[in-house]
Image (cartoon, rainbow, N blue to C red):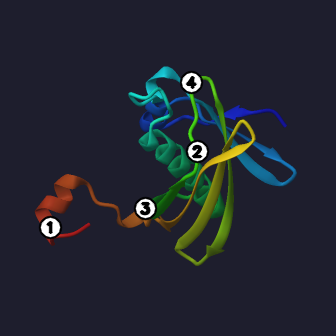
């Protein structure tokens, strides 16, 4: 299967072109490091790599919940190497565990056949029927979301 562009949200478009493909029953994600992703040392910025991880694992959770919205509630990141402009990042996620409303995901990100960053996190299914607007929330003023 060929790579398919999935950068649809405003934030994803700001971050850059995120692509996915299914290969041997494994979803893979790809992004190329560009000038806007570099820190002052000309390496991929840690925040960019964390955003890539969050997008990859979040998409994995979204698919596991049957394409229903979910949000990141916790994420750990481990940096082992870096990437430079033009390097291709390949994220390979996997589901560790699922409950009715939680998805535990881990991911390794490779560049030039080396693991450069890995992470794990928890995503929570969003109850879309009970979502409130900020205006409604302020009116309720119960002190939490």
Q: Is the residue under label 3 in contact with that under label 4 (CB below 8 Å)?
A: no
Give coordinates of residue 39: x percent, y percent.
41, 31
Q: How far is the residue under mark 2 from the one under mark 4?
A: 14 Å
Residue 129 sits above or below residue 49 on the image? below
- Under circle 2, the secondary element is loop
> What residue appears at the point 62 percent right and 74 percent down from the top-left corner?
98
Query: Reading the chain from its start, which is encountered first: label 2 or label 3?
Result: 2
Q: How far is the residue under mark 4 from the one under mark 3?
A: 39 Å
**Mark 1 Cα within 10 Å, few/some/many (few <14, many 20+)?**
few
- Under circle 1, the secondary element is helix
Instruction: Name the residue beneath numbered marker 3.
Output: 128
Query: Reading the chain from its start, which is encountered first: label 3 or label 1?
Result: 3
Q: How far is the residue under mark 3 from the one under mark 1?
A: 18 Å
Instruction: Name the residue beneath numbered marker 1.
Output: 140
**Mark 3 Cα within 10 Å, few/some/many (few <14, many 20+)?**
few
Q: How far is the residue under mark 1 from the one under mark 2?
A: 47 Å
Q: Which mark is residue 85?
A: 4
> What residue appears at the point 57 percent right and 29 percent down from the top-left corner?
84
Instruction: Name the residue beneath numbered marker 2.
Output: 81
Query: Reading the chain from its start, which is encountered first: label 4 or label 3?
Result: 4
Select label 4 or label 3 by which is in front.
4
């Amino acid at each position: 299967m060929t790579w398919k562009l999935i950068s649809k949200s405003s934030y994803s478009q700001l971050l850059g072109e995120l692509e996915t493909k299914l290969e041997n029953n494994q979803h893979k994600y790809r992004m190329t490091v560009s000038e806007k992703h570099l820190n002052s040392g000309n390496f991929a910025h840690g925040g960019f790599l964390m955003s890539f991880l969050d997008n990859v694992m979040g998409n994995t959770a979204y698919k596991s919940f049957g394409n229903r919205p979910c949000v990141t509630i916790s994420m750990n990141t481990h940096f082992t190497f870096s990437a430079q402009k033009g390097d291709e990042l390949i994220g390979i996620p996997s589901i560790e565990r699922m409950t009715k409303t939680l998805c535990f995901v881990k991911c390794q990100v490779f560049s030039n056949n080396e693991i450069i960053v890995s992470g794990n996190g928890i995503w929570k299914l969003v109850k879309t029927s009970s979502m409130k607007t900020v205006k409604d929330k302020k009116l309720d003023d119960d002190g939490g979301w």
